[in-house]
Amino acid sequence: MQRQQHPLKQSFFSRPATIVAPALIGCSLFRKFDDGTILRGTIVETEAYLQDDPACHAYRGITKRNQVMFGAAGFAYVYFIYGMYFCFNVVTGKEDEGEAVLIRALDFSDEGYDVKVANGPGKLCNFLQIDKMMNGISLFSDTSSIALTEGVARMRSLEIESSPRIGIRLGKEHAWRWFLRSSRAVSATKRTC
DNA sequence: GCTCGGATCTAC
DNA sequence: TAGATCCGAGCA
């Protein structure tokens, strides 16, 4: 039986996104569904988005959609894209600064699922039933339907690789995507530069 | 108001 | 490589 761990503290998230994103690789994500079912997955791929960054939703300042990004760290920023998919982000940094970390892929193979169930931002939201209703929820509380904890095994920094982010037009010069080299759950598209 | 295009994914 | 298919943002 696996012992339930304490969630990551809010102070973990109140650091720059470029620090939090690689630090989240190897951490666990717990999802508690309405029927009480709990799933645990390992974060294997993240991307950092800073306010001073044309690829970031917060680049043009605060709007109704992105206002969660400007709030306190450790809350979920969920948005809808391409008419069909949701993306799940964790707000990072100081309050009033619009930045976040996009969770791109999770590995649920420890729970017996195929690695392909959550190997992409849209797919993981579909698998975990994350939608707009989850926008703004806390991720550092025991009672949340989603919580993040330290990983079961601490990752060696050697196993973490970085690359430019995926699916953006501007800001490609930054290698602000991090992923676990050994994981088969890393999103399939464009693994390298 | 209306238009444009996107931090995606799947199948053709 | 296109198509599905919505909504925020920007501009008029």
Image (cartoon, coloured by chain):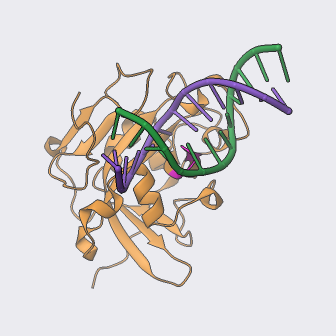
Chain colours: A orange, B purple, C green
Q: Is residue A45 above or below residue A193?
A: below
Q: Position of residue B3 (x, y in %)?
A: 70, 25
Q: Residue at x 32, y 79 (%)?
A: A3
Is A141 on the left-hand or right-hand side of A62?
A: left
Residue A94 visible in image: yes
Q: Quadrant for residue A170, please give it.
A: top left
Give the vertical position of A108 relative to A60 (above or below). below
Q: What residue sits 28% from the left and 60% below the top? A: A116
The quarter in which the N terminus of chain A is drawn is: bottom left
Q: Image quarter for residue A5?
A: bottom left
Disc tally is: 0
Where in the figure is residue A163, as x and y percent of width and height?
26, 31
Q: Position of residue A144 (x, y in %)?
A: 56, 68
Q: Is residue A8 visible?
A: no
Q: In the rendered image, which quarter is residue A115 located in?
A: bottom left
Q: Residue at x 41, y 57 (%)?
A: A123
Residue at image x 42%, y 68%?
A30
The magenta span reads A80-86
Instruction: Give percent across and percent down for residue A91.
Output: 54, 44
Horizontal side of residue A29 vs A93, given as left or right: left
Q: Classify the position of the C terminus of chain A by image quarter.
A: top left
Q: Is residue A50 magenta?
A: no
| Image position of A112 with respect to A86: above or below | below
Judged left or right of residue A122, residue C10 is: right
* In the image, residue A100 above or below residue A76: above
Choose between A9 and A176: the one closer to the eye: A176
